[in-house]
Structures are given as C-alpha cells and as structure tokens.
Image: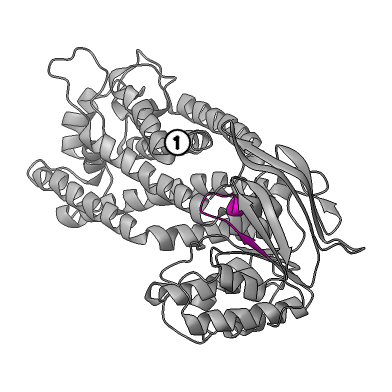
Amino acid sequence: MAVTDQIYLKVEHLTKVMKQQIILKDINLELNKGFIYGFRGKNGSGKTMLFRALCGLILPTEGTITVGGIQLGKDASFPPSVGVLIEYPGFLNSYTGFQNLKMLASLNNFIDDNRIKETIRLVGLDPEDKRKYRKYSLGMKQRLGIAQAIMEEPDLIILDEPTNALDSEGIEELKKLLLELKNKNKCILIASHDKEELEFLSDEIFILEKGKIVDHYHLQGVEK
Amino acid sequence: MMRGYFHFKLFLRDLTYSHSYGKYKYFIFYCIVIILTAAKTLPLKELDGNSADVFFLLLKDVGYFIQSSGYEIPVNWIFIQFFILFLISDFLVHDSETNSSYLILRIKRREQYILSKLIWIVIQNILVYSGLFIVIYMISALLLGDFSLEASSYFQNTIQSQAAILINPIQLILHLFFGYVLTSIVLSGIFLLFTQFFASTVSFCFVLILGSLSIFIDWKWLPAIHSMILKSNLFDLEHHLSLTFSFVYSVFVYILLAFVIFSVYRKTDILK
C-alpha cells in the first residue's frame, strides 16, 4: 500500500456485520491525497458497502475509519469534505440539470451558481440547457450525478461505477476530469467491474472478494 | 437543543421536492375527490343542503360497531385516510431510498434529516387536508350554487337529529378537519417508525391494518378513531371521544414517535 507521512484516509480492521452476515471483513487501507484508487470485485463483493462505510453512512461493527485526522463515529459522523456517487441520485424530473444541482448545493451554501455552471461544463453538459431531467439520456444522467459529487470541490471523491451508461467519448472525458482532480490533490476512490478502465485511471488497485481485500497492486509509473 | 437539529433549507427542499415529485399523484387524488364530492352533492340539490352537509356525508364514518350484520364499510373514510397516507409514505420512502445519502453527507447530521421529515409530515398533512377541504367546499358550493356554511334544512333535519349535542356546521367541519389531520399525522409517524425496522411495503400494510382496526374496534386509544366523526362526542356521549382528547392524544403519541424515530435513526445504517 502507498505509505507516506501524511495518510489522508486510514481504515483499520474495518468489519461490518449485518443480519449475522459478514459484509466487510478486516479491511485495512491507507490512502493519500493526489492519488486515484481503484476497487474491483464482483457484484456483492462489498465495494459499495465499503464506500458507504468510508462516507460514514454505515457504522462499523469493528475497526476505525479516519479521514483527514477525524475518526468517524468518534470525532464526527461524516468526513469533513466528501463527494459521492453511489447509484443515481433522485434528481427531480421536472427540473433542469442546473436546478437540480442548485437544490442540493443550497443545503450547505459552499458554492455559488457560477461554480455549479462550471461543474456542469466540466462533465460535458450545458448549464444553459433548458431540457428537464426527464429528457436526459442515461449518459447525461450519469454525468449530472458525477457533477453533484465534485461540484463542492471535496477532498475525498468516491465514485461507484462512474462509467456506467457513458459512451466512449464520455469515458474519455471522465478520465481526463479525474486526472485533473487528482492533480488538484484530491483523494479519489473508484469502483468498477471494468479492469482495463480501472487500471488506466488508478494508481493502486484493490480487489475485493466476499467483503475482504484479497489483493492489491500499484500502477504508478505506468504510462497513462 | 432541537434548534441545532433543524435545518430550514432542508425542510424547504423537502417541501419543494415532495410537491414536484408527487404532483401527478396528488392531481389524481384531487380528481377522485372532485368526483366523490359531485356524487354526494347532486342528490342534496333536491334536499336543500349546502357544502357543510357534503363535508359530513363525504367524510363521515359509519359509527360504532354494534353487530356485524348490516354494518357498512366506511369506503370514503378508508379512501381518503389511506390515499393521503400513501402519498405521504410514498415521498418518505422515495426520498430515503434515493436521496438520503446525498442530503445527509451535505448537511453532515442524520438528526437534521429525520427531524426535517418529522416536521414535513405535520406541514404536508395540514396542506393536503387544507387542499382537500377547499376542493370539497368549492365543488359542492359551485354545484349547489350556494356558498354559505349555515345550517341548512337538511342539516337541521338529518344531521342534527343524529347528533348527541347541539352542533353547528362550522364546528362539524373543524372537527372533521382536525380529526383527519391529527389521525394522518400519527399514522404517518407510525409508518416512519416501522420503516426503520421493516420494508416499506410491510410497514404500509402494518399501518393499514392498524388504521383499519378502528372500523371494527371501538377503543378510543386507537390512532385512527380520531377522524371518525360519528364516534366523536358530537354524535356519541357514551365513549367520551372529544376533539380535545383527540388533540392531546395525537400530539402526545406523535412526540413519542418522533423521539423514538429520532433515537433510532441516529444509529441507523443508510443503505440506500
């Protein structure tokens, strides 16, 4: 694992048991800012559950999660600066993309309209597009989902299957965007079942099986 | 202390989102109410009735359960009570399943999310029932060509004769309004509590059964009995079911439910 003096996200012996089933088993991670981490595994291997735990959305049965020096469940319930995409957000069909993002952004007032529009452009959509969300293609919906995850410029970005529904052009744009975010010193976690895509983007890959990390390997230095 | 848990912008978002999300369902509901209102209003033209009589005829139950033979099912009461409960539950489930993660990670507190829903339940029920009463009033008044809410001859001859005390139409309408609103708030709260432990469909069935018990069981501690006007002390003095009792009971039960939901949700895994 990548080890530096300043570990941004540290997971120690994380275990989650639900309804007498082990969902996550003794997970240990040390992740840093400025890197992209890929998580690969079959459906039900625990990728999404791990991401939910890292966000503070599910509480560990055992173990600790520390993000930016803050231990989740002890110092704070959730990471101080996190953006996620885990399944489609329930955007309103009768609102435009901009209106949907504005509604979410209004909750914490971190960003203004200009930043929302800028993010929409970053994901390859048009902020002035008057079409309602119901008219969006699946790819456009996915792009808007990614926009809501990154619009507040969080330090920790967690994307579960971000390339779902994207065409080849969309995937290329996403790759470019993620590398830009990485260069802005973000800690980025991606789950995907596509080995090739994940290896292209990631600096380090973790392979999950039955809630356990069974393998990991570095890809730093590989020509992107 | 509760002040820190209340997130006004989240509550405003809940109101806006729920109305946009459920607008077609609400439209269908009000269309059905218009049809039901018209069906109750038209016969009253011959009987010199007015809108107050329509409120009574449309929203009344069938009174205390005395014997099974000849006992009618209060179809309108069931439809209105449970359709609105469905509309409320539908949003609570949808929002929890699709938006809770995104909202909670922004506001950073589970407590704010659930408190907003608890307040939304109260306000939304008041708004939906206000809409219902306005629709009934407008449709019946337009069809009858009479916008007054004074005691009609139908009211004096038919409704007053069933009453246990001397009542006036406004008193009757207010009793109906608060009875339905209080009942719906409590049933929505019970639904929200059940969803913390069971699937949403199972929870809805539980609440449906619990609410329906009041049709057959004459016990004033049941949550849904408070919207049954014929079981209230306006029409029955034996069971002492006053609006004051209904109010105190419902407020107490809802606060209790809110406290339990609040405590449970703080430690709940957000899986959707």
Q: Is residue A203 visible?
A: yes
Picture quadrant where residue B252 is located: top right
Q: Is residue A218 left or right of residue B130?
A: right
Q: At 20% across and 57% down in the image, what residue appears?
A: B142
Whole-percent x and y of residue A159? 61, 65
What span is colored magenta in the figure?
Answer: A38-48
Whole-percent x and y of residue B230? 29, 25
Picture quadrant where residue A18 is located: top right
How many numbered circles are shown? Answer: 1
Which is nearer the eye, A204 or B23?
Answer: A204
Secondary structure category for the residue under label 1: helix
Q: Is residue B123 left or right of residue B29?
A: right
Q: At 34% across and 27% down in the image, what residue appears?
A: B209
Whole-percent x and y of residue B176? 35, 36
Q: Is residue A120 visible?
A: no
* Furthest-left residue in this view: B46
Which is nearer the eye, B59 or B50?
Answer: B59
Q: Is residue A31 left or right of residue B156?
A: right
Q: At 43% across and 27% down in the image, what residue appears?
A: B223
Q: Quadrant of the N terminus of chain A?
A: bottom right
Residue corresponding to mark 1: B182
Which is nearer the eye, B189 or B269?
Answer: B269
